[in-house]
Amino acid sequence: MEMVPSTMTEMWTTMGSTIASFMFIWAIIRQYCPYELRRYFEKYTHTIMTYFSPYIKISIHEFTGDRLKRSEAYVAVEAYLSVNSSKTAKRLKAEMGKDSNNLVLSMDEYEKVTDEFRGAKVWWVASKVVSATRPMAYYPEQEKRYYRLTFHKRYREMITGAYLEHVVKEGKEIKVRNRQRKLYTNSPGYKWPSYKQTMWSHIVFEHPATFGTMALEPDKKKEIIEDLVTFSESKEFYARIGKAWKRGYLLYGPPGTGKSTMIAAMANLLNYDVYDLELTAVKDNTELRKLLIETTSKSIIVIEDIDCSLDLTGQRKKKGGKAMADDEKERKEVKEESSNSGNSKVTLSGLLNFIDGLWSACGGERLIVFTTNYVEKLDPALIRRGRMDKHIELSYCGFEGFKVLAKNYLKLEIHPLFDAIDGLMKEVKITPADVAENLMPKSPLDDAEKCLWSLIQALEEAKEEAEAAAAKKVVEQSQDGGGVCSENCLAEKASE
């Protein structure tokens, strides 16, 4: 009886000594054995072990190829496991879900969870591999994340077929349900933490604008909504006609007419992300293409005030005053001019290829929106049909637009002062932004009538300024003509 403890003690002592010896030898091997030799040994050891193991493993990596874009399969598996792993995993990570009202849980790195499908048990592991190369001073170690699926070989046909299809399909549906719309912006290339990480940074997109709150004529509003909805439902149509599933919109008009609000309303109508592209932060055309590749489907790519972004306003000379109809000649001419663009980081030719070149077909269901205050300054090649398919003019506020704003700001659909405002709006140009500012209460004591009188006063002042400007113009024209007008003459011309 006394020999048992001593035997157990000897056994544990021997085992501890063996493990310690093994760890020492392994440390020596890792320290002095060349990396290539170790990799060779691990490779063939793994090959030998697979002959004795009844399990099959499938790896789904986050990036494939040159890692320009995240794998759709990886994203779908991530979404699928966010639901199916939250009940069994012990280590989870949390992110904000749709509308920022809930947290979406998913398995943390190196966590293992079990799933079942038609009686077959499978195991998922979230893992990563860190590059063996030494990182540069400005770049961290490169990480390759992946999910590994393990299952028994007798279920091979079912898992590689029906189960993976089930995972991808359900993962995409979960992703749409939990999708939180985002507003992206691009950063200068020198600020990227590593070559693999995204070139876009984002915040949650929570702009409240809708077409219902926009000061637009009802017919124009209906036309735009129908065009957008038709585009979003036309995947098969674009495939049939052989065109990339994208559409260009040019929004133009005076400042304060609601161009940025229109973009927000588009995003809210279609539930799209918004990519606000700052061209001055883009190094060259190659970087511009990389930015395009990293945008997702169901998105709006926006370049605001494009006439101010780069030197894109030059009017190219036409031989003999005739337009070149051939698109190849047009592109050649654009390249010649853009080479003389001085300090421009992106050429006009590069931007045209970004809009409708071969790279524009990477992905689908995208809107490309340009805004400008001076459409006449833009190069015709930039805004022709096929690039900017639909031109939308956002002009001064009319009476129908005013009624929308009055309902939004003052909760009024009718008021005795509406007639006076209608009459003044027919004579004076005023932007929706100016109308909204006058309708907005400035203190708790401001009621609806006071706000309407504020708008009437602004309209009357604008009318007086317009009349004074017209009278001044008449005087200048009279002086240039060498003639002298009487006061009655000037008054008649000013009234005209």
Image (tube, rainbow, N blue to C red):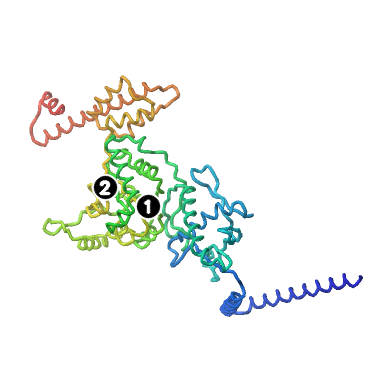
Say which element carries label 1: loop
Taking the spot 34% from the left edge, 53% from the top edge, the residue there is 235
- Kindly identify the amino acid type of the residue bearing the numbered disc 1: Leu
Which residue has dot 2 on it?
390
Image quarter where the C terminus lies is top left
Badge 1 vs badge 2, beta-carbon distance below 8 Å = no
Describe the element under mark 2 as helix, strand or loop: strand
Instruction: Kindly identify which numbered label has been placed on residue 277.
Output: 1
Closer-to-camera residue (420/206): 206
Residue 448 in picture, x, y percent from top left = 38, 23
| Distance of label 1 from label 2 (alpha carbons) | 20 Å
Is 262 above or below relative to 83?
above
Nearest-to-viewer mark from 1 and 2: 2
Quarter of the N terminus within the rendering: bottom right
- x, y (%) of residue 371? 31, 46
Front-most of 286 and 364?
364
400 sits left or right of 74 in the view: left
Q: Quadrant of residue 200?
A: bottom left
Residue 424 image point, x, y percent: 25, 26
Q: Is residue 242 left or right of residue 490?
A: right
